[in-house]
Amino acid sequence: MNLSERDKLYNWHPYTQHKTAADFPAIVKGEGALLWDENGKEYVDAIASWWVNPYGHSNKVIADAIYEQLTTLEHVLFGGFTHDKAVLLAEKLMTILPKNQKKLFYSDNGSTAVEVALKCALQYNYNKGIKKTKIIAFEDAFHGDTFGAMASSGISFFTKAFKGSLLEVIRIPVPTKGNEEKSLQALQNLVVTNEYAAFIFEPLVQGAAGMVMYSYEVLDKMISICNQNNVFTIADEVMTGFGKTGKTFATDYLVNKPDMMCLSKALTGGTIPMAITTFTQEVFDGFYDDDTNKALFHGHTFTANPTGCAAALASINLLQTYAMQYNIAQINKLHLAFEAKIKSHPKVKTTRVLGVIFALEIKTESQESYYGTMRNKLYNFFVENGVILRPVGNIVYILPPYVITNTQLEKVYTTVEKALEIV
C-alpha cells in the first residue's frame, strides 16, 4: 500500500466526512511555495497551508533557529520558570504590536488564544464583582473549535451539534459596504445594556466566511463604542496577523486599538504550533491581586515552548526584511492586476483584494453550501491541476506564501480562470 492508502487505516482528518472522501495526496517534501507528493507530483501551495506558512516550506532560516534551540533547550515548564527565548520574543513583539499591548500569554493554537481572551474578559469582570456574562460577535465569524471559540463563531454547521452547551453570544451584522449603520446600531443597542464582557472580531477580513472584507473606518467606530461602554474588544488576528493584510497586523490600520489580540498561524512560520494572546495593562491589572483566587488559572503543558519561541523570533525577523516586505507589495500588485482582468468575467459576481488576500465570488442560481457540490468540484479541479486552493462554497480565495514566484502565482491565476469554465 502507498502512503495515501495506509493513511486511511488509522488517521481521522479535520473537517472530513471519511465515508465520501477520496484518498488524500501524501505530501513528502516542501520547498518555498511548492509541495510534492509521494508520486512526485508538484503542487503550488496557494493558501500557505491554511495561512500558516508565509516564508515558504523548509525555510532554512527558521529551520536553523529551531535546530540551534533543540540542541540547547528543547522545552522547560513555564509554570514557575522562564527562559531566554520567551523573554526575547516578548521584547520583540512589543516593538511591533500596537503600543497599548503590554502583556503576553502563551498557548498553542488559534482556538486556545481566543479561549484565553474570552476567559480573561469574563473573569476580569467576575474579579471585580461585576456580572457580565455575554459576548458580542459578528455573524458568519469563525474563531476556532474549542468551546468558547465555537460559541463566538457564527457558521452554524460547525457548531449546531453543541447548541445549548456554549457561552451566550449575540451576533451582529458584519459591517460590509452598505451595512455599516445597521451593524453600528446593533452594537450600540447591545453595549448599553451593561451585560456584555467583550466584542470579538476578525479585523477587516473574515477568513472562513470566504474572505469577507469591511472597512477599518467602521471598525474604528465600533471599538470606540465599546470603549465608551466598558466592553472589552478582542481582535482575532490568527489569520490576518503578520503581513496578510499588507500591514504587520490588521489593527495597524486602526486609530482605536483593541484591548486584546489573538495571534497564531504565521507566528512560527508554519513550523511549530504556538499562540499568543496579548493584553493591555488594564486587563492584566484585573488579575493582579493579593487574592490568589483572582489569578488566571489557565495553562498548557507546552506554554512558551522554547523551540516555538525560537521559530517565532526567526519568523518575525524574516517578516521585517526588505525582501519580504517587497514580496508582500508585489503579490498585492499582481492580485490587483488579476482582479482587474477577472472581475468582468460573466461567471464572477464580486472580487476583493487586501494585502496578499484575493477572493472572488462565483455567480450561482442558489446559495452554495460550505462543502457543497460546486466547492468539491472546484477543489478537486485545483488539486488535479497542481494547485492547492480550498474554496469556501462558491468563493475562491488565494492567500499564498510571500515567497511565491511570479510564475507560480501566474499558474494559480490561470488555473482559477480555467476553473470558471467548469462551473
Image: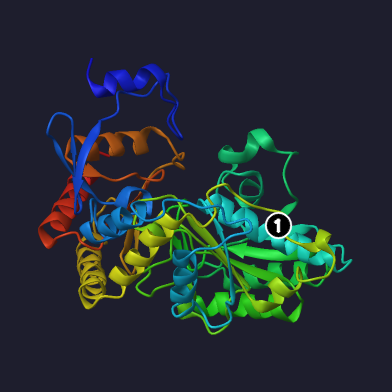
- Residue 410 location (% of width, % of height): 14, 57
Quarter of the rendering occupied by the N terminus: top left
Report whether residue 113 is seen: yes
Q: Nearer the viewer, residue 256 or 99?
A: 99
- Give neighbour class at mark 1: few <14, some 14-19, many 20+ (Cα, 10 Å): some
Quarter of the rendering occupied by the C terminus: top left
- Residue 293 location (% of width, % of height): 83, 59
Identify residue for label 1. Answer: 119
Q: Nearer the viewer, residue 70 or 328?
A: 70
- Residue 265 location (% of width, % of height): 42, 55
Residue 29 sits above or below residue 48 on the image: above
User: What residue type is disc 1 on?
Assistant: Lys
Point 39% across, 73% down: residue: 248
Residue 225 sits above or below residue 67 on the image: below
| Residue ranking furthest to the right | 129
Residue 142 sits above or below residue 35 on the image: below
> Within the image, what quadrant is residue 72 found in?
bottom left
Point 25% across, 64% down: residue: 339
Report whether residue 211 is seen: no
Residue 204 sits above or below residue 75 on the image: below
Colour option used:
rainbow
